[in-house]
Image (cartoon, rainbow, N blue to C red):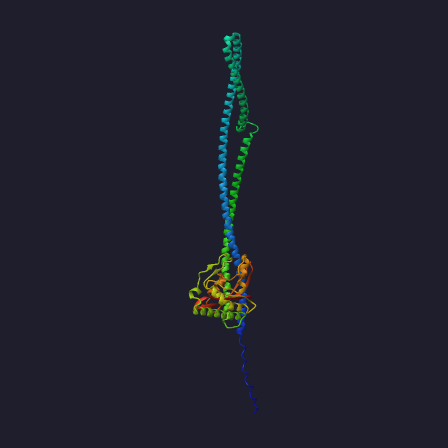
Amino acid sequence: MFNRRPPPPAVMPTQPPGPDFTAAIRGIAGKASELGRGAAELDGTIEDVVASGNRQVTEIGQLAADMQAMMTSNRAIESSGEASRVAMDQARDAVAQVGQGVLGVVTSLRDVASAATDITQIALQTRLVAFNATVEAKRAGEAGAGFAVVAEAVKDLAAKVEQSSKLIMSTVTQLDARIDSLAASITDNKDAATHSAFHQALAQVEASVNEIAAATQRNLQTCQAVTTEVGTVAASVAANAETLKRVNANTRSFLQASEALAEITNDCGAVTTDTPFIEAVQRGAARLSKALERAVAEGRISMADLFDEKYVPVPGSNPAQVMTRFVALTDELFPPVQEELLASDPKVVFCAAVDRNGFLPTHNLKFSQPQGADPVWNAANSRNRRIFNDRTGMAAGRNQRRFLLQTYRRDMGGGHRVLMKDLSAPITVQGRHWGGLRLAYSF
């Protein structure tokens, strides 16, 4: 017999290593974060383009209104020009009538001059008769003395009449020359080589009125053409704006999907780069909830005052600030928690609580400076007492899930915007949702 060797011990197959789900979740979380950053940047860019398009629509609408006002003004000018032409025709007719009247005056003056000439001749003859009567009275001696006195008086009267007649003739001659010149100026002689200065001026005025009317017509045609073009551009810009709004809505959905993915990965229990911030904002929200509940329990504020939504504007504030009946309490209770979280990590940009409507009563101390005269500086440094009812602010204030992770562009003032993450956790008082604590940090 062969000594049979015992068979070698059976080798149990080794179990292949299981997949590292934690590492996979971390990878997904990292990709979700990158995706959210890109989506937020794209969303912000499209939002800027939409805002620019809306401004263009408004500006084009104002331009169209200005063009309509210009057309109305040109029509008023056209109407006035037409009235001026009618008035010019009436003036020309009136001047013609005056010219005829002046010619009648010239004729009458010449009749007066002729009569004065006749009176002068009669006066000369009277003087001659009086002279002869005086000679005859002297010859009669004393018998003719009385007759001589009468003759002398007649001679003196005749001399005065002759003098007056000559004065009348001289005056009439001067008037005749002046009125004849006036008649020549007023009367439009179409056969004359040159028109009078008066009619030249009248013609110049008429030509100017006609030129204004022609320019007005050109302006009206131009305005109508521009108005038509503006209407076409306005329709195109409005259509583009609507398209951009739809694109922005799609981008917003894409952004929300990336945010949801980031939340899911963090909900799986794996530690990601967001985990420390999630835990911190949840602890902070719980501390604020307890502080507010304690204040209500101690009678320091009523529930009605704590949930006050009558936002009273602060006079002269720019950007607008408001006040409520709970601001004094939040100014006392919120800073210790908010300042602690602000200093917890260099990436944290701000930490502040908002109510359900995005009202931020008490901000970090560095963002709670008194407002000045510059609204741009105020927007960056006086961010307390303001309502942030944008997408991120409203979602943070109304979120009631364990936490909400959002990606957005924060307006730092002066047109400067920074991409960051915004974590929020709900604040509740006696089971009633008050708002949320926001923790914003950079990528």
Which x, y percent locates residue 53? 52, 55
Residue 63 versus residue 107 in the image, above or below: below
Residue 332 versus residue 314 in the image, above or below: below
Which x, y percent locates residue 61? 50, 50
The residue most toward the front is 142
Which x, y percent locates residue 210? 52, 37
Q: Which quadrant: the N terminus?
A: bottom right
In the rendered image, which quarter is residue 297 located in?
bottom left
Instruction: Report if residue 72 is visible in the image.
Output: yes
Residue 156 versus residue 28 in the image, above or below: above
Instruction: Report if residue 411 is visible in the image.
Output: no
Q: Residue at x 52, y 9 (%)?
A: 137
The residue most toward the bottom is 1
Q: Which quadrant: the C terminus?
A: bottom right
Q: Nearer the viewer, residue 46 or 173?
A: 173
Q: Residue at x 51, y 22 (%)?
A: 109
Which x, y percent locates residue 22? 53, 73
Q: How many marks?
A: 0
